[in-house]
Image (cartoon, helix red, strand yellow):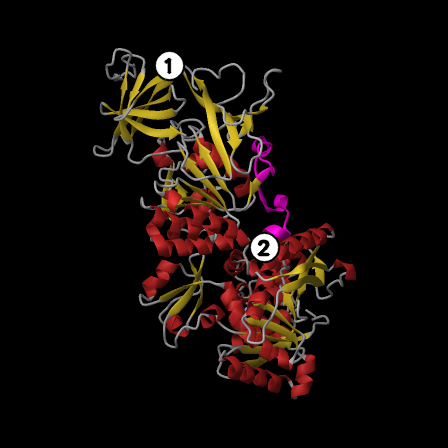
Amino acid sequence: MVVDDVPRLVTVWCPDWPVVAARVPEGQPAAVIQANRVIARSPAAAAAGVRQGERRRSAQGACPELLVLDHDPDRDARAFEPVVRTIADMAPRLEVVEPGWVCLAARGPSRYFGGDQAMAERMVEIAHRATGASPGVGVADGRAASSIAARRAARTRSRVQVVPPGGSTGFVEQLPVAWLRELGEVTPELVDLLVRLGLRTLGQIARLDAGDVLARFGVEGLHAHRLAGGADTRVTRAVDPPPEWWIEETFLDPVEQLETVVFVAKRLADSLTVQLAAEGRVCVRLVVIIETEHGERSERAWYRDQGLSAHAMVERVRWQLEGWLHQPDGLSGGIVLVRLLPDELRSDDGVQIGLWGGRSQADHDAARAIVRLCGIAGDDAVRVPMWVGGRLPTERYRWVPATSVDLDDPGDRLDRGEGPWPGGLPAPSPTVVPDPPVPVEVLDESGEVVRVNGRGEVSAPPAVLALPAARHRLVAWAGPWPVEQRWWSNDRVRRLARFQVVTDQGVAHLVGLEQQRWSILATYS
Amino acid sequence: MTLASIVPTRDRCFPVDEAVSTMLPDAGLVRGRVVGCTGPAAMSLSLGLAARATATGSWLAAVGVPMLGAEAVAEFGIPLSRLVAIETDRGPSAWAERVGAAADGFDLILTRPPSGAERVVRKIKQRMQARGVVLFAVGPTSPGISCDVEFTTVSVEWAGLGEGHGSLLGRRAVVRAGGRRVPRPVERELWLPGPAGGVAAVEPLGEQHDGCVPAEPGGPAGIDRPVLGRAG
């Protein structure tokens, strides 16, 4: 496959940046957890067998002394700011993909420093001296190839990998398919499928016919095919947006609070993405400009190959602000201007995967709050519902600890399967389900306890619900609806008769009679 | 300069179902407000209010609401994937701490304030306002907290259950919205839940019943209409 006119790019990539940003002492096994999965680990933890993407409990099982840290993207952004600044001193036109990952055009700096190799080595050295970070630097044609080169370089001693001009195709060809997942370009499911179909290297995918790949795997497959051929990510000729598409907000009163700026940025981002979507475009390169009342200015380009959604844009504004705020020569006054400038657009192919996995800001915030609540109240006090199924209200959903499930993928947890549960009660369901049930007495007009015989006949119409503290007259009732469960097991057999009753207070209960004892199974509050 | 001075109130609202939105002065749940729900249908009412916002992506934390029926929550249209329950022990300080921590990440909090909550409520309210969170305080009686918006079920009637036959189908409830932020208290008859699940307005039956009647301030259910059946 012929590589069309792709720019030569440098990628600077810091491995396991969230752990580095958390300033874990050397030699300490540590892992940063997001949504209950390991997203980064320290070298010591990696040596102990903690793997990327592993669940928290299994990581702790592999390495009991593991220091578990919450993911804090703002902390990552703050810590990354000095690295970005150091690189910007060498080559100002850079774009940040995420904290720990920067891209820039190779041509200018490479000429200035005397070749790709010399420039890359210098970048590693300067970044290390200035911040202590030890990034990998990769130089290659195209974004995907240079990103892979940087990741491979980070594992070597020299920390530099230069793919000669025109060599990207050959470089990419021999790599295993799993690199697509590593770059966050393709879903793990597709990579899995490709491997199971016997396509193990990118070269094997590249040799397939593009039309066949599209027919079989859709747009995502075609994207994988392009990458495998060493072409640049997505369409290379991005459309230049018309100049009037930038959007800004000026404040007459300088704004001091970060949250307020972020909130305003959210409104800007929302209207910008709506505007772009109406044209069928997504923004892949966004320039964020922020100015203070004293004329200080922060301008940064953010790149995301999959396209920046509204919350991705807001996230980047927040990162930029966090980084700026925590600089020694940061801002000295309130903010008077926020401008979002879409710099590169491409047509929207509807693929939104990878880095963010479809998580919204609300999902992020909730996941972080859940982690904090677990810390305060204990893992067992923070629970989410899981579908079990059954005929009684207590059986249908079980509350399980939030840390034991994948909050991002509630499919299995809440999948109720096909068809109804015979013997369950129709909607509406009770809002209050005491477990264990509350003992009561159900009496008839003459004050006798109501009985149900073996044939399901009621001794007399229920008339009074007698709680320990109060008696309520019943104005409506229906039943008995018998349940006979697990009759095959001697110790787990249950036989009970259910009734719905409404008291004169207008409160409806589901009551049950089991082994001659009445109890409130649930209340419709 | 605070958020409130930049963003108009209507832009700081969580959406609510049409049946309830006409009862609220801003047609939605304004971020940072405390919403009280009392009466026999208090829990259903709060779930009905939270349904639209959670369906559009917000998360709901149930703090100190033991025995919550997850199936009923789902029937109100709340995605269970965005519901988390947090247990607390009895004391108001533990409750306040957990409500405060939940406010950092959840848009909506459903809670039964424990006794003694009025001692910590001031701090909680400030936290809700700072984070833009709506807190539903649910209780069979008034929880001793002055709420920005207060919903009370004035009378209820269950449909579908007879004497020895039928099964519960839905509940008609006369709900009154009042509180500090509601200048004109409004009463409305709602299905809580309706036969199709969720909140719905009860269709007006006749001319004497226009569905939305301003109540007399301070008085009890100040409306003149046929008594809603046995319960009430």
Identify residue type, mark 1: Gly
Which residue is more in the foreground, A88 or A3? A88
Q: Chain of mark 2?
A: B
Q: Is residue A207 visible?
A: no
Rendered position, A487 above or below A114: above
Which residue is more in the foreground, B175 or A24? B175
Relative placement, left or right, of B96 versus A185 is left
Q: Quadrant of residue B141?
A: top left
Residue A389 position within the rendered picture, expressed as x and y whole percent measured from the top left: 38, 36
Residue at 31% over, 68% down? A65
Q: Please name the residue that numbered disc 2 is placed on.
A: B2
Let me know if residue A214 is in the magenta part.
no
Residue at 61% over, 45% down? B9
Local SS, label 1: loop
**Where, quadrant-wise, is the N terminus of chain B in this rendering?**
bottom right
Residue extent of the magenta highlight: B1-28
Residue B76 position within the rendered picture, expressed as x and y whole percent measured from the top left: 49, 34
